[in-house]
Image (cartoon, rainbow, N blue to C red):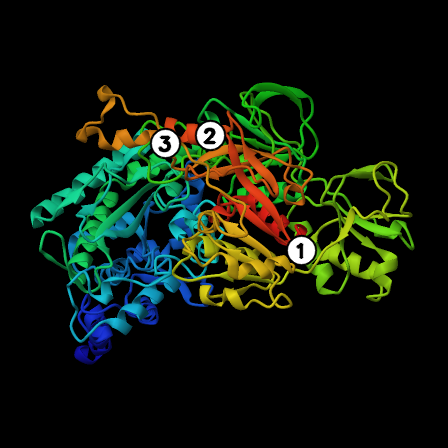
Amino acid sequence: MIKYFLYPFLLLWMGVFTADAQVKSPDEFLGYALGSKFTAHDKVLDYFRYLGKAGKNVRIVNYGKTYERRELLLAIVSSKENLDNLEQIRKNNLILSRGQKITGKQFKQPAILWLSYNVHGNEASPTETALKTLYTLAEARTGNIQEWLKRTVVIIDPCLNPDGRERYVNYFNSVSGLKPNPDPMAREHVEPWPGGRSNHYYFDLNRDWAWQTQVETQQRLVLYQEWMPQVHVDFHEQNYNEPYYFAPAAEPIHQDITAWQKEFQVTVGKNNAKYFDQKGWSYFTKEQFDLLYPSYGDTYPLYNGAVGMTYEQGGIGAGLAVTTIDGDTLTLKDRIDHHYTAGMATLETVAQNADRLQEEFRKYFEKGMLVPPGIFKTYIVKGSNTGRLKRMAALLKKNQVEFAFGAEGTVSGYNYETGKVEPFKMERNDLVVNLQQPRAVLANVLFEPQTTVNDSNTYDITAWALPYAYGLNAYAIKESIKGRYPFMETEQAAVALLQRPYAWILPWNSLDDAKALIALQKTGVKVRIAEESFKVSGRTYDPGTLLVYRSENERLVKDVSAKIAAVEKIAKVAFYPVAGGFVDKGKDLGSSVYRALNVPKVAIVAGAESSAQSMGEIWHFFEQELDFPLTTIGLDDIGNLDINKVNTLIFPDGAYGDSIGEKLQEWIKIGGKLILFEDAILSAAGKKPFDIQKKEYFKDELPVNSIPKYLSRKQANLSNAIPGAIFKVELDHSHPISAGLGNYYYTLKTDDKLYEFLKKGWSTGILKPGSYMAGIAGEGVLKKLGAGMLFGVQPEGKGCIIYIGANILFRSFWENGKQMFANSIFLVN
């Protein structure tokens, strides 16, 4: 009788044992040995979902889709007890991220470890590693792994950039043979343009964490902010001839990174080194990969209280196997083993230090609220341009940086525009960021006027202060000042005040106004631009202001007033109606200075000659920012342009040889507008019809006692280094290309190129001596950038050529540059 009573329990026990035993390894599930080929993204997802069902300690979370509609997901793996209390663990962790202590908990709070793989698509081994790592943790067959999972919740994102990775994998599979060819010259080791590193729009997602311009980053950061890990590891690949890199990081290290964060990087590094030493694997630390630029997968977590780290395995372009410069053969399996070992060693270190990690995490945010970093306690951004201020506020909100609007009185602060401490009056729409808040460090890093750099051999740009990027005047205050209102005061639409206006007027100040123009022109409304300032009905309007005349539009479209009202609602702008054409000051509204605007028909040149990053930034701007059509053409087709189909042609940054020249001359003369970005200008210099020459700088002869030594070769190059510095550009405000840009345009320069002033056109943006504002720029670079043209417009027949000598769309976070680009597209004839 007893045996029959126990039989169901025996079956249940056997079923559990069988289920455990049947959890398939990646090799078993995929049907090939991991590392013998690249795993397609859909197969990666299938295996993660499989472990989510078959493994008793894995949960799968879908968090979005890429631009190409590939699914984004991650796995959460921990002990059964932790997973049973997962939501409470998450909420407790958010309490710590507000600098508060957890009270009344019923279980021991684990640390959160987030592992991110394959943010660069052609650094392809990390995703394979994610499969092996999740399987090992899902199995949890050894006692040490079980103990680690009791002390940690591990979040595994197998691929941050599926679109780029699939681009790389599909290319590799299309050109590789039955067996991998390790010869570095083989086609499988040389990717064609644009390569798989970037996402759909050719953006580097590892430089997008803070700016969140790309849909993959936006969706991931929502989830990241809901979890706020104590440790984040970003798995990469570097040149396949390099050994493995792991923390601690190189200088420069931002001054706001804490002693504990640096100390724990060393702790992790030593444990990683222990396992690498046992296997005889080469590695390096404290070189090349620094902690400064705030938008990396290591620095962004660091500025959000975590210990962020980058791990780099040699492997870009290695395919399945490659012969290295040392004569060794590096295989995909080798790369997986190295990343897997580093990841597991890091998990061990996190588990062993879980309590300390959480306490230091809490203290990080507590200190931010009590003793904010740096010498400034408040940043105040003037509300002179509400369109760009709203976009800045949206960015701060995405990053959970607290802010408010409006303050009263007069205070003194560091003026970003003049570089001096000056008094100013605080006003209702000023944006106020008080640093006494949990995200004090991130806020300070994003706003600090000048980033302190101890070692200028940095991996990326050294200046990014938001007031310069957004073209908004701001002040840094040493006193603690708090805003009074949670929202900006906006001006209401005024269409209904007049039954039959003579005209509707829209000031041109932001991309919202460009969207309004696009919407009007789509409905057939004729729009004009004021090329000079004027005053009417007591309000002054600057050059670049848009006008819609009732009489000329009533012949073209029905119910102009209703169309204006609809555009106001969609674009969130306010038109100002006027009763007549007689103005208080300036030219009356019937003057020829109110020029009709053409509807742009835009094409961009794209191909191996183009910078993929530059082309992608322009492409993204048109599709995602403006929702405006853009035609992509090849370089070979530029001689066949039909002015009726393409009246605006863009050359992104790139090297085009002799292709830019006389074949475009006739097209320009009959009304074509040619826009040349950065090095595309060099391809046009010296050719007809281009009135452009690079400004040359001749060095003095090097004194004998100044000849550099080999040991100091890196420092010797610093005089000519410019790893992203900000310069003040003086604008010609009478030209439409400068409309809405404010007193100055602040440009991010990553090179030393400058141009001679135009003889046949207008040098609309120039650098003068003393233009340097922030960031690292060597002495030699500052001499070269002393005086010359950066932006210019050359008329040619009925058309024109626009020269843009700096990246005004840099990573899509340089907001003020978007205004200049919109001006170039829509306002300049």
Q: Is residue 494 above or below residue 619?
A: above
Seen in the image, is 222 located left or right of residue 761? left
**Residue 466 visible:** no
Residue labelled with disc 3:
254
Q: Is residue 448 above or below residue 818?
A: above
> What is the x, y in percent for residue 271?
17, 42
Which element type, helix, strand or loop, lies under badge 3? loop
Tag 2: residue type? Ala
- Looking at marks 1 and 3 on the same chain, the residue that comes earlier in the sequence is marked by 3
Q: Nearer the viewer, mark 2 or mark 1?
A: 1
Q: CA distance from mark 1 to mark 3?
A: 52 Å
Where the N terminus falls, by quadrant?
bottom left
Q: Nearer the viewer, mark 1 or mark 3?
A: 1
Seen in the image, is 574 located left or right of residue 690? right
Which element type, helix, strand or loop, lies under badge 1? loop
The disc placed on residue 798 is: 1
- Looking at marks 2 and 1 on the same chain, the residue that comes earlier in the sequence is marked by 2
* Residue plotted at (57% across, 40% down): 758
Characterize the local packing of mark 3: few (<14), some (14-19) or many (20 or more) Cα atoms within 10 angstroms: many
**Residue 49 visible:** yes
Q: Answer with the quarter of the image where residue 134 lies.
A: bottom left
Tag 3: residue type? His
The one of 403 and 3 positioned closer to us in this rendering: 403
Q: Answer with the quarter of the image where residue 472 lies.
A: top right
Q: CA distance from mark 2 to mark 1?
A: 40 Å
The disc placed on residue 774 is: 2
- Looking at marks 2 and 3 on the same chain, the residue that comes earlier in the sequence is marked by 3
Characterize the local packing of mark 2: few (<14), some (14-19) or many (20 or more) Cα atoms within 10 angstroms: many
Characterize the local packing of mark 1: few (<14), some (14-19) or many (20 or more) Cα atoms within 10 angstroms: few
Q: Is residue 57 above or below residue 706?
A: below
Tag 1: residue type? Lys
